[in-house]
Image: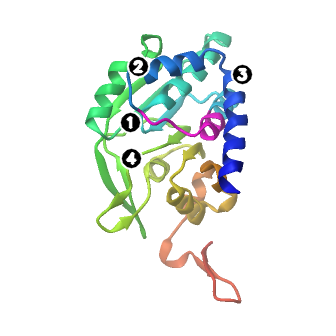
């Protein structure tokens, strides 16, 4: 049941994406000839574009460069056509050096003033009881929206999670942080544990997540005293 439902949802989101960004289909086709990127779920791409078109964030962090970079940049370009005072920046992090070089080489020139692609080798990140991986060299910018699709999170100990969202949240001066996650169920699970299920909705059939995080909740956490249990002995974070 999951696979047929996933195909239907992806099909609908793909149609919505192409309607919202009329030129993106041809641009993605041209980009695929120069890059071997496997691409992103259409559902995640539509979630991201829909959010960007509605909220117009000034600082966007993309974790994992690829075809999604074009989609985010095209959404921003469309907004700039409508509002010439809008000057955002997409910071796109890539942890694999060969993919980083490929991404820089294949980024269309029309997006050069919108996107900055940076090399950030995979780096371990630990916060309280959580162990994950981030891109090194993430610049200190007031990110408002994050597209999470990297880096790799498996190691010799098994599965961890992509922690870029938590890294940014832990250093953010913003009151809220929004974004999407492509796949990477463990990353959404960690966000749900810290911020609550309502802050990080994960849709398993289409492997996509939307999140809207309250920074105050993170900053007030003291893990050693922040546990709660119910009458049946189930533990959760307050």
Name the residue carrying label 2.
107
* SS label for mark 4: loop
Quarter-wise, where is residue 125 in the image? bottom left
Instruction: Looking at the image, tell me whether mark 3 or mark 4 is earlier in sequence order.
Output: 3
Boundaries of the magenta span: 37-48
- Residue 41, x across and y down, in percent: 57, 40
Query: Which residue: 54% across, 18% down?
Result: 87
Residue assigned mark 4: 151
Mark 2 or 3, nearer chain start? 3
Identity of the residue drawn at 31% across and 48% down: 122
Up the image or down, 113 lies above or below 238; here it is above
| Sequence order check, earlier mark of 2 and 4 | 2
Category of crowding for the residue at label 1, using alpha-carbon neighbours closer than 10 angstroms: few (below 14), some (14–19), many (at least 20): many
Q: Residue 201, can we see it?
A: no
- Looking at the image, which residue is at 63% across and 31% down? 49
- Name the quadrant of the C terminus: bottom right
């Amino acid at each position: 049941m999951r696979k047929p439902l996933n195909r239907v949802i992806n099909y609908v989101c793909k149609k919505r994406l192409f309607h919202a960004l009329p030129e993106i289909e041809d641009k993605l086709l041209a980009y695929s000839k120069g890059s071997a990127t496997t691409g992103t779920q259409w559902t995640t791409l539509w979630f991201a574009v829909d959010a960007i078109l509605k909220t117009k964030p000034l600082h966007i962090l993309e974790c994992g460069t690829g075809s999604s970079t074009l989609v985010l940049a095209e959404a921003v370009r469309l907004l700039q056509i409508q509002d010439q005072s809008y000057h955002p920046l997409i910071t796109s992090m890539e942890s694999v050096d060969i993919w980083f070089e490929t991404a820089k080489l294949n980024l269309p020139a029309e997006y050069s003033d919108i996107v900055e692609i940076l090399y950030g080798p995979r780096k371990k990140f630990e916060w309280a009881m959580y162990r994950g991986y981030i891109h090194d060299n993430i610049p200190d910018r007031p990110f408002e929206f994050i597209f999470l699709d990297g880096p790799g999170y498996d190691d010799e100990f098994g599965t961890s999670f992509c922690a870029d969202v938590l890294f940014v949240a832990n250093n953010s001066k913003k009151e809220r942080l929004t974004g999407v996650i492509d796949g990477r169920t463990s990353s959404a699970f960690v966000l749900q544990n810290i911020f609550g299920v309502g802050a990080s909705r994960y849709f398993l059939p289409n492997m996509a997540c939307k999140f809207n995080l309250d920074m105050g909740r993170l900053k007030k956490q003291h893990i050693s005293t922040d546990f709660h249990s119910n009458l049946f002995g189930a533990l959760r974070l307050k």
